[in-house]
Image: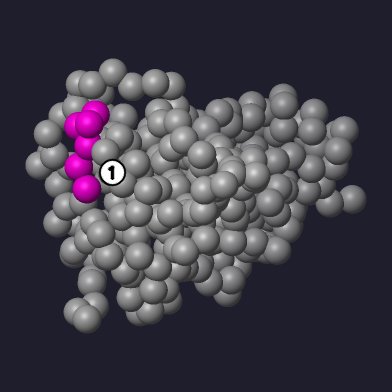
Amino acid sequence: MEVPNAEASQSFDINSIPVSTHPLEAFPFFSLPKGLVEQNKPVQRSYDKLFFAINGVMTPLEGKVWKSYIVTEPGSTEEWSQPYFEKSYDDAITKVGGVKIFDGEITKAEYERYHNQASYLGEDGSIGYDGENIKVYVIHRADGGDIYIQLSGNSASGKLNILQKEAFKQTITLLKADQIQSQLAEKGKAVLYINFDVDKATLKPEGQEAVQEIEKVLKSDKGLKISIEGHTDDTGNADHNKKLSEDRAKTVLKALVVSGTDQSRLKAVGYGAQKPLVPNDSEENKAKNRRVELVKIN
């Protein structure tokens, strides 16, 4: 079997799929086939990242997510039928303008390439394991809220994933100097979300604004000393994350020194993913863990 590569998924063009204007029910859009039920409570998140098999490449998509194991209703005289499960969804999806874009297995090499990025693997309904046969559909919507559905099954049960694409809505706001000062006084530390370039230690313009707020605090309290502590989520290599978090902390320190703060009042350290605020089990939570903490030095 030919090993797929990243270009294979990039060659998929959503604009090559006809737009569906068919009215749909509320998310997750489809009821279960008669006689089938969710084995457990479905995993449903207003925002997450989920990998879909596109041209044999597990490709990350972001948006609203629903996934579950599907089984025969308890007490039913009917036995599980994989063809019934698959045909039910194929008919339902294609009738509303959906198109099947993949039907096959991902290779062992592809699983090894991506699986560490999919922290949700092991949850109910997760799809994307080595040797698993996966069917993927897309319903192209004019408003950009494209709907991706993937399913897999065996002789005992099925799995179903539904994602509607949606841009991430930032809910974290910039702390102002008075808020930073208040948190340092009350808790001994302040949690900041400072924007850096992706996988780099260079500040974005909004990140520079955050540093200016720290600078105001230090100028208003000449005796204040702080430890600048960088943190990441758990995506990727632990050593890389630790170095990245340390480099980002040092970037903040250097910016404060350049603005006139005495370096003896500052310390920079990076912890990588060692001290998460919340579990790294969703994109929203990972965003909360990617932070800089200012800790008051007594």
Q: Is residue 220 magenta?
A: no
Q: Amino acid at mark 1?
A: Asp
Query: Element under label 1?
Result: helix
Residue 159, visible in the rendered structure: yes
Q: In the visual, does 6 lie left or right of 275?
A: left
Between residues 196 and 170, which one lies in front from this camera angle?
170
Task: Tell me the residue that label 1 is attached to.
Answer: 90
Which residue is located at x 22 percent, y 48 percent?
100
Q: How is the image coloured?
A: one colour
- Classed neighbour count for the residue bearing mark 1: other residues with Cα under 10 Å, few (<14), some (14–19), many (≥20): some
125 up-or-down from 133: above or below: above
Q: Residue furthest top?
A: 23
**Relative to 65, 269 lies left or right:** right
From the viewer's perspective, is residue 106 above or below residue 43? below
Residue 99 falls inside the magenta stretch: yes
Q: Nearer the viewer, residue 282 or 196?
A: 282
Question: In this orientation, which residue lies closer to the viewer: 3 or 294?
Answer: 3
Image spot of residue 118 (x, y percent): 49, 60
Q: What's drawn in magenta, residue-wise?
A: 94-100
Res 188 → quadrant: top right
Q: Position of residue 74 (x, y in %)?
A: 64, 45
- Quarter of the image where one finds residue 113: bottom left
